[in-house]
Amino acid sequence: MEIDVVTLSRLQFALTAMYHFIFVPLTLGLSILLAIMETTYVMTGRAIWRQMTKFWGTLFGINFVLGVATGLTMEFQFGMNWSYYSHYVGDIFGAPLAIEGLMAFFLEATFVGLFFFGWDRLSKLQHLAATWAVALGTNLSALWILIANGWMQHPVGAAFNPQTMRMEVTNFYEVLFNTVAQAKFVHTVSAGYVAASLFVLGVSAWYLLRGRHVDLAKRSMAIAASFGLLSSLSVVVLGDESGYSASEHQKMKLAVMEGMWRTEKAPAGFTLFGVPDQEKRETRYAIHVPYVLGLIATRSLTQEVPGIENLVDQAKLDIAKGIKAYDALMTIRAAKGQNIADITKNAFEDNGRYLGYAYLLKRYVEDPRKATPEMIEKAAWDTVPTVWPMFWSFRIMVGLGFFFILFSAVFFYLASTGGLDKYRWLLRLAVWSIPLPWVAIELGWFVAEYGRQPWAVEGVLPTAIAVSHLGIWEVAITMAGFITFYTVLLVIEMKLMVKAIKAGPQPDMAADASARARIQTVPAE
């Protein structure tokens, strides 16, 4: 790999994002589980549910604080490492992030304080409302961030302005209700719910194996198993929807995920196993499941799914149109507001949406109009990410997804039949399975983001020209600093979580006193 500012900047953002996303899924899922537990407490009045809410709330709080600390750095990187990206698309990308801070994060942060310190200061219903507000704020934060990210995957509701040389919002409604963003949001939060469910299952299983806090552990497992089963089914269904979205808006990503080099006769089969060979442009030892890819990608048995080589040929045509757009843009810029021929305006209007493809040539020549056929060929093949990591990341992620469905279904059945502590090997498996949702989530993030390369914004802005003008050592030193700082935070979180889990749920004096008071008021028979 060529080590340059672009590569280091991408690596720095990838590492900080992956660290941050260690904390986010658990925050998303636990917030909903806490609200469900406290709702049960308010409805039943049983002290055990209040104790459960407070115990899992402690683990939520530890995770929430460190998630905030790691998330703030990522937003500053847009100005530090990706200044041209911020200039070029900041009008669109910045709006959802600003709304996330004003609407969701402040809501979440405010009611987190009421959740922890309001138990004895608020009524039951008031505290329950605060807990649901935390859950709402947490999930709204994810919504706005994924609206911003979804726009990068499918840039709608915006247009390039030749006078300002920036992308500008033309229809915020389209940005907000971007089909890719909505699918990504529900898919991502469902994955977070699965992570929280398996976390609760694993910790509760650890208690059962040691015969500690049995009542709390069994109730927690019953809720986590049912919530996890619904969430894991949702992840698979919405993953199918994401595949359909990719077939419409990110055809190259889908072809690379499948290691499909040439367009196959409809309906295309899903490659269950294979060894992609990028140099020979083939996937060896491929085992296909007939019809599956065609059904997922096109919702039909008659439409083709284009292969990598066919999409590269299309990219060459798009680059040619992009060069025409670039030529018209330079003419418009040189005119400096004076009248220009209608033919130039029409050339830009007809080809302007392909301007980003001309920018792919900037890697090889300063003026895309001077590109040779060889440069165009290279730029077209630059639209193909490295196939094998995409191919295997996707399959491991999908395999884990089906494992989560089976795993949650087994524990849901055991919870329904009163057999949660019957099979100790299953409890041990639950403990060892705690990290697996994070493996699947990180792989899913990799597929979504690496699969978009070479684009910072799909079809609009190449990653190679989105970076700041920094030196290699400047980026390398800050990256080392971030990694060190994040690693320290991760170690701190793990120690705090393990300490809290070992200590277990603390006696709830207020709930116990309330229960004793109720007993004393019951008239003797």
Image (cartoon, helix red, strand yellow):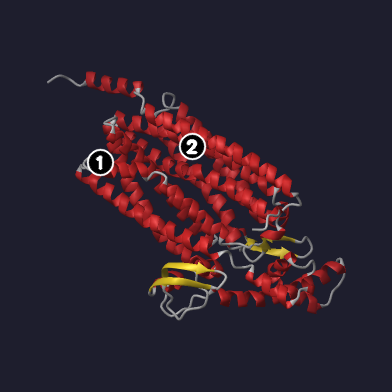
* Closer to us: 261 or 321: 261
Q: Residue 65, percent across and down?
A: 53, 35
Q: Which residue is denoted by mark 2 in the rendering?
A: 63
The kind of residue tagged 2 is: Asn
Q: Quadrant of the N terminus?
A: bottom right
In this image, 425 relative to 29: left or right? Answer: left
Q: Residue 120, percent across and down?
A: 41, 24
Give the Cα separation between the discs numbered 1 and 2.
29 Å
Residue drawn at the location 76% of the way across and 73% of the way down: 371
The kind of residue tagged 1 is: Arg
Q: What element carries label 1?
A: helix
Q: What element carries label 2?
A: helix
Q: Quadrant of the C terminus?
A: top left
In this image, 121 relative to 171: left or right? Answer: left
In this image, 298 relative to 462: left or right? Answer: left
Image height of 220 relative to 510, above or below = below
Residue drawn at the location 59% of the way across and 54% of the way down: 148
Q: Residue 225, percent across and down?
A: 31, 46
Image height of 486 relative to 504, above or below = below
Residue 199 got which mark?
A: none
Q: Can residue 485 be seen in this view?
A: yes
Residue found at the very far left of the displayed protein: 525
Residue 424 got which mark?
A: 1
* Closer to us: 316 or 340: 316
Residue drawn at the location 71% of the way across and 76% of the way down: 320
